[in-house]
Amino acid sequence: MLKMPRIALAEGGPEVSRIAAGLWRLAEWNLDAAGIRAVIEACLEIGITTFDHADIYGDYTCEARFGSALSEAPGLRDRMEIVTKCGIKLVSENRPSHSIKHYDTSRQHIIASVENSLRALRTDRIDLLLIHRPDPLMDPDEVAAAVEPLRQAGKVRSFGVSNFTPSQLASLASRLPFPIVTNQVEFSVLRLDPLHDGTFDACQGRRIAPMAWSPFAGGRLFSDPSDRAERVRRALAAVAGTRGASMDRIAIAWILRHPARIVPVLGTGKIDRMRSAAAGAAISLTREEWFAIWTASAGCDIP
């Protein structure tokens, strides 16, 4: 079995697996701790060592579910990288003090969120902390004042953002005494925006690797009846036929072909689907193949 390659998100690290496992829907998988542990172990066997969380996932329950599985086999923690996010406050029975859905990147909230995540995940460190969404009231100096002591204490090893525009990333980065190592954004063959709005250009300029959530467009890539999705499926199938591969592998290979070194975040808990998609890391598309798929999605030839 081919092992998953690894990359450094930024100069000096951190290192992550070329494809990450997303835990957004973990609560929907209806797995007990043993079942979650089996998923973790299967990912590690494939070489997927990076696990992507957020405090709000599963109505604030996914981190604790994952932590319960880790507690049954503590040795697993040293074989993985844990990513988590903070900065969104949901109205939830699990957070009765929240009266309205909003963003909060205050020093108090970031520190409290990290401490909550550490307890829920049953770990002593977060390998990569992301600000989940741009906050119109964000004070970059206050973010730095929250994250720097967490880094010094070893509770947060690296820092990044999610869903930030290039200008928002630059504004925050300009005031931090430590590097932003990634920007996690929505990207797939049905979501081309980061290719053209400067998002990936900004990451390449900073020599940081972006992460891509929803690399299969939330499943729409395989089920959407729209003309665009059908065009894309035909293009994927054509390349898949010549490559002797499945469409999901080609969809992943298409993302990985970009020189920004994008890290797709898979959102499935089904091991066979993970294995199939992960095999896309071994496929290097030609420019012609890549542009054939891009053209199908864009609905036009290049200018």
Image (cartoon, rainbow, N blue to C red):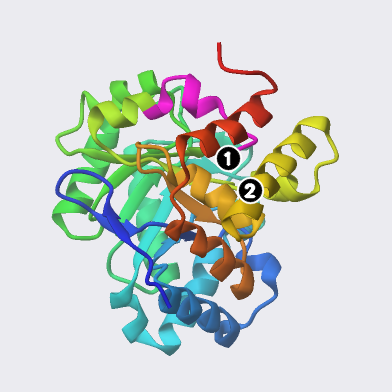
Q: CA distance from mark 2 to mark 1?
A: 6 Å
Q: Please indicate, yes or no, whether residue 97 appears anywhere in the rendered image.
A: no
Q: Amino acid at mark 1?
A: Ser
Question: Residue 3's x, y, as percent?
Answer: 37, 71
Quadrant of the drawing holding the C terminus? top right
274 versus 136 height, above or below = below
Q: Earlier in the sequence, mark 2 or mark 1?
A: 1
| Residue at 39% from the left image edge and 71% from the top image edge | 47
Taking the image as shown, residue 146 lies to the left or right of residue 50, namely: left
Residue 50 vs residue 190, the one in the foreground = 190
The residue lying furthest to the top in this view is 303
| Residue at 50% from the left image edge and 50% from the top image edge | 253
**Residue that numbered label 2 is attached to:** 216
Stretch in magenta: 188-200
Label of residue 188 in the image: 1
| Residue at 70% from the left image edge and 22% from the top image edge | 299
Question: Residue 129's x, y, as percent?
Answer: 34, 50
| Residue at 59% from the left image edge and 47% from the top image edge | 214
Residue 33 vs residue 35, the one in the foreground = 35
184 versus 22 height, above or below = above
Disc 2, disc 1: CB below 8 Å?
A: yes
34 versus 208 height, above or below = below
